[in-house]
Image (tube, rainbow, N blue to C red):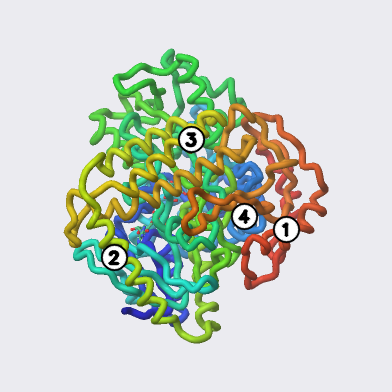
Amino acid sequence: MKITDVLVIGAGLAGERCAIEAAAAGHSVLILSLVPPRRSHSCAAQGGMQAALGNCAKAEGDSPDVHFLDTVRGSDWGADQEVARIFADTAPLAVRELAHFGVPWTRLRPGINRYHIKGEQVDVDEPTDKAGLIMHRDFGGTAKWRACYAAAGTGHATLYAVDSQVVRLGIDVLDRMEAIALVHDGERCHGAVVRCLRTGRLETILARATVIATGGYGRIYGGYTSNAVINEGMGAVLALDTGIVPLGNMEAVQFHPTGLWPAGILVTEGCRGDGGYLLNAAGERFLVALEPEKQELASRDVVSRHMMNEILAGRGVDSPNGPHLWLDLRHLGEEHLTTRLREIYEICHDFLGIKPWEDLVPVRPTQHYSMGGVRVNKDGQAYGLAGLFAVGEAACWDMHGFNRLGGNSLAETIVAGRIVGARIADFVTRAGPGPDAALGSAELKAQEQRLRDLAQRPAGGRSLYQLRDEMGEIMMNRLGVFRTGEEIEAAVRDLKRLLQEAGSIGLRATAPGPNPELTYALRLPGMLRLALVTAEGALARRESRGAHHRIDYPQRNDAEWLNRTLARWLPGAEGPRLSYEPVGLLDLPPGHRGYGASGYVDLDVSLEAYNQRVAAAQSAEGCLETAEPVGSSLRPGAWRGAFSAPN
Ligand SMILES: Cc1cc2nc3c(=O)[nH]c(=O)nc-3n(C[C@H](O)[C@H](O)[C@H](O)COP(=O)(O)OP(=O)(O)OC[C@H]3O[C@@H](n4cnc5c(N)ncnc54)[C@H](O)[C@@H]3O)c2cc1C
């Protein structure tokens, strides 16, 4: 049995940034990861990280107020505006700090620079007094260029730099170690039971604070995702299995417009930000007419819907794997594509054998980002269980609402990592008696029994991998870009059947050591529960908001659905129990996003009346006290000046 002050489950950007903060405050910290930290999914992020530094000419006039506005509109008003405000205010600091960690940000080159903007070549005179400062690219449909980037390897460069800090501080990282259950007493979390993926040995790690930083749940969409194979949502399962901690907005799943077809590998939005466009089979730039203002850079949910409509209308390009559209990068030229978008060139070349300055790139929307996750308060503390925190894509903090803006998630990992890490450091300092070892032993025994039961099931029937593939098909076909009540009901029925089957399938390989089948058998029922939570949430939400688009309820409905879905799964229950809380304090009133559909059902109470009930309603749902009183981080109306800035 190990004991530490802080146990961080996950060594991606969010987990590591959070660990640094707690370790720098003098606490002992242990990080777990399925893979060596630098192989975490954060490493795959290509395009950029949003922070309102306002350095380049096209960023002039930018400020955290404008960033706040973009984030809330992008979220389709599903975000907690207080969190969006904290985020936008802190992002510039967190990005500058990364420069000190050694991130090789692409820098501003003064004088005339040639860009491609809305299909035109434009010469822009970059300011001499900003020479060498961090450069921005157009990314995420924002009002100002704001995404800071390190060529097309932003996540790679950032994760390596942050991991170097982890090494410098001497923080222990145990890789190939999987947390499989939390240790808790119903009110307080005391650590986790972990399984060594090399030996199969189980162990308890007791902690005063435990952090879920396990990334997204994209792999419940099987192969239809840009996510790495390790993004199976196991952190969300850890929380769900407590029966106490709710998951927030699991139906809020983002589809990225440009997944390489059919491999699903992401082609960064930076391509469109740098001037790439989308074409249909006839070679037409269909988005110019559909979104005159933002064109290819409208928010991801909007562009994905337009693309699927184009395909459904028969204007896609036929291929043996089904229809797709084209991303045209040819006009950007070889030099740009082998420097500022180098990883894209490599992906196109290595996986398709093409040169994107000569050939069109086949793309189609694919699952990409998990807005939903473990529901936490402003401090990152999970609802209902003191001492349990969540951060990064695994969490529903919730600055993304129903659509996360491009570049905002990398920024979230480091912003939330800093803030939540500091809150954890305070929490541990104030924490009373150490964790309960007897509880740890009891949970260890329960997990050992779970493994024995699995190994003793008679082998036979379908394989786990067949169930996984069926789950992926159901999720993509019935809970994809477009959804209907009828389709979702069918999905719920089928997922329930798969969950039952997963509970009885026997293993072909039962050795406790390095056994991928056993490892997957432990994970699959949890993934199916997440799929069901996603489906039930989507079925119940009778409106269209951000990435959740119901063909049978096409309007956003602020009168009935300006809320967040909370899902708990009580022990032994057949399905999740859903409840709802207000999205958070409103400062920017719900309105038109500036792109996409313009109709919506208005809020039927005043902002004041809505705001009055937020704190009480959220605490009734299990929200724990935050270190700062609710409302302290909104600067009401601060965005008003920014609102008049040209968009
Ligand atoms: C292809 C791609 C490109 C992207 N590009 C951008 C971009 O340009 N800009 C942007 O802002 N965002 C981008 N994103 C999103 C962004 O990269 C992610 O949201 C972010 O990196 C998530 O970081 P994280 O630390 O929360 O999780 P991850 O980096 O996914 O890390 C999760 C960690 O948890 C560990 N783990 C998981 N389960 C367990 C368990 N049970 N026990 C122990 N350890 C566990 C894993 O080993 C891993 O270390 C992109 C995403 C993808 C898929």
Percent of width and height locating residue 101: 40, 65
Residue 624 visible in rendering: yes
Of the numbered discs 2 and 3, the one sitting upstream in the chain is 2
Percent of width and height locating residue 312: 48, 19
3 or 4: mark nearer the eye? 3
Badge 4 local density, few (<14 within 10 Å), some, or many (20+)? many
Q: CA distance from mark 2 to mark 3?
A: 32 Å
Badge 2 local density, few (<14 within 10 Å), some, or many (20+)? many
Residue drawn at x 39%, y 81% is 437
Q: CA distance from mark 2 to mark 4?
A: 36 Å
Percent of width and height locating residue 99: 43, 61
Q: CA distance from mark 3 to mark 4?
A: 27 Å
Q: Residue beneath label 1, please?
A: 614
Q: Residue beneath label 2, please?
A: 195
Left/right placement of residue 509 relative to residue 382 reads left
Of the numbered discs 2 and 1, the one sitting upstream in the chain is 2
Q: Residue beneath label 3, please?
A: 479
Residue drawn at x 41%, y 46% is 528
Dot 3 beta carbon under 8 Å from ligand 1: no
Q: Residue beneath label 4, please?
A: 84
Q: Secondary structure at mark 1?
A: helix
2 or 1: mark nearer the eye? 2
Q: Secondary structure at mark 2?
A: strand
As drawn, 633 above or below 191: above
